[in-house]
Amino acid sequence: MTPAIEVRDLHVTLGKAAILRGVDLTVEAGSWVAVIGPNGAGKSTLLRAIGGLLPTGGAVSLMGTPLERLRRRTRARMVATVAQTPVVPPGMSVFDYVLLGRTPFVSLLGRESAADLAAVTALLDRLDLAGFGDRELDTLSGGERQRVFLARALAQEPSLLLLDEPTSALDIGHQQEVLELVDTLRRDQGLTVLATMHDLSIAGGYADRLVLLADGAVVAAGTAREVLTEEILSRFYKARVKVIDGEDGPLVVPVRVAPR
């Protein structure tokens, strides 16, 4: 089966700074891969490069097609990205914001069809947002907004979902709610998910594979139990941790340094 994402020798330089250096990455269709790593490792840059938002060196292919051969509209139907802090137009309603996700299906001088409106209505219902359509986005809670951001992405009918720290601003209850929703949608709709994640235990519990970036390069890749080891985390995070074997994957627990 053709991989959903194939990256070979990817380089990204911003200004004079080399952010990514020779990254290789393969994401199988229908899988969930989490990109982890210390601050400044290049995680968000990797997602932006794969989404076609940055100039790059090397090769990126999506569903077997080189990124540079994909027209913008085609790419928008194939890939949906949820940024860490999406830009929200002031005063915009939930329904209108999610409707923006239908833009790739609207002709240049056309307007949304009845089918587009129906697709948004169905998504709001699917994501438990049916009663929020007229609400302004800035009146919602963090968990509710995150579901709206997912709804807009899913309105594009993508086969690939790129998530940049999807739970970074959420409490533990809303984190679980959002991640369970993503996993259910992945299984039900055959989505491929590539997500940067900060919480290592949560990443190990949800993703099929982990890719650890450090200083712009891949330094470890594999299952959670292969990547989340005390030796690897100590080396690349410069942290003292204890890794406990949990029911759904390794649990990474910080170890306090004893006061002298």
Image: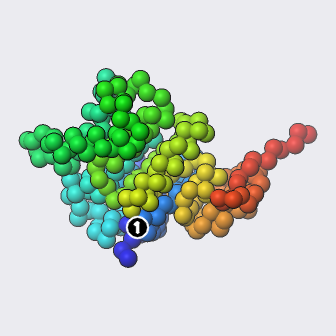
**Camera-side residue of 163 and 216:** 163
Point out the residue furthest to the right here: 260
**Camera-side residue of 130 and 42:** 130
| Residue drawn at the location 23% of the way across and 64% of the way down | 69
**Camera-side residue of 79 and 8:** 79
| Left or right of 41 in this view: 113 | left
Asked if residue 61 is positioned above or below residue 200 in the image, the reply reads: below
In the rendered image, residue 159, in percent from the top left (x then y), is placed at 34, 59
Quadrant location, the N terminus: bottom left
Instruction: Say which residue label 1 marks.
Output: 29
Q: Amino acid at mark 1?
A: Ala
Asked if residue 42 is positioned above or below residue 94 in the image, the reply reads: below
Q: Colour scheme of this structure image?
A: rainbow
| Residue drawn at the location 73% of the way across and 60% of the way down | 245
In the rendered image, residue 197, in percent from the top left (x then y), is placed at 54, 50
Q: Secondary structure at mark 1?
A: loop
Number of residue marks: 1
| Residue drawn at the location 62% of the way across and 63% of the way down | 224
User: In the picture, residue 94 is in which quadrant?
Assistant: top left
In the rendered image, residue 223, in percent from the top left (x then y), is placed at 60, 67
In the rendered image, residue 25, in percent from the top left (x then y), is placed at 46, 67
